[in-house]
Image (cartoon, helix red, strand yellow):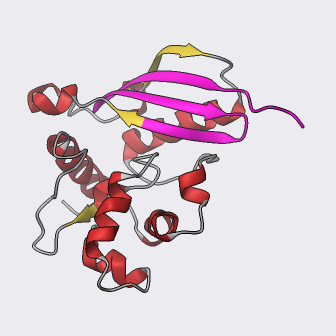
Amino acid sequence: MSQNVMSAVVLQTPIGIIHSTHTSKGVQSIKLDQSYNENPTIINKNFGASNVEVIDHSGPLDENVKSFIDWLKAFFGDGQMRSLPAIDNEIIDKQNFTGLVLRTLMMKTSCGSTLSYADLAKLCNSPKACRAVGQAMRANPIPLIVPCHRVVGSNGKLGHYMSGKGDNIKAWLLDHEKMAAGAL
């Protein structure tokens, strides 16, 4: 049985530094650096694929990693979703409520749209599980690919992205997607 090769990539993006890990099967994790949230004026308002660059990496930049980088460039370029890069994460794959919520969110939302925690709970056939949906969002190992930034409160408020440390990033992501979708 072959062992998965692990790569770590650090990218500069319009919303700051993104750290990602990859196996030979796909993206394993994405971590957004919250330092850009602390000073929203430094979030890069210029869109474009040229705003995504690899600034460090360990391990090979294989086809799965390159596919992820290309996906990020497209996402930050015009905001439109392309074919998702391959994913290799047990939280997403698990046959439990968290896995169901994350997979449903990936399949049922589109660029420029939002839905409430309650709406997502209903889509998962658990209309009273709003808080559990919030916990699933907190457990999301691959933000952006699983677009937890699109989930808002029933009152339209943003919620607490990255445990409240990424609210400016969430607002930027939603504005970016709305502009890309022609909804702003």
User: Can see residue 83?
Assistant: no
Total number of numbered discs in the rendering: 0
The answer to whether 10 is drawn above or below residue 138 in the figure is above
In-front residue for pair 38/132:
132
Horizontal arrangement in the rendering, residue 167 relative to residue 83 (left or right): left
Name the residue rendered at 44%, 80% in the picture: 124
In-front residue for pair 63/95:
95
Q: Which residues are magenta?
A: 1-30
Horizontal arrangement in the rendering, residue 156 relative to residue 19 (left or right): left
Whether residue 80 is in magenta: the answer is no
| Quadrant location of the C terminus in the rendered image | bottom left
User: Can see residue 184?
Assistant: yes
The answer to whether 116 is drawn above or below residue 14 in the figure is below
Horizontal arrangement in the rendering, residue 180 relative to residue 145 (left or right): left
In-front residue for pair 157/124:
124
Task: Answer with the quarter of the image where residue 183 lies.
Answer: bottom left
User: Mainly helix, strand or loop, the magenta region?
Assistant: strand
| Quadrant location of the N terminus in the rendered image | top right
Name the residue rendered at 67%, 34% in the picture: 23
Task: Answer with the quarter of the image where residue 114 lies.
Answer: bottom left
Whether residue 10 is in magenta: the answer is yes
Name the residue rendered at 53%, 69% in the picture: 96
Q: Position of residue 69 (x, y in %)?
A: 53, 32
Q: Position of residue 82 (x, y in %)?
A: 53, 52
Q: Position of residue 175 (x, y in %)?
A: 21, 51
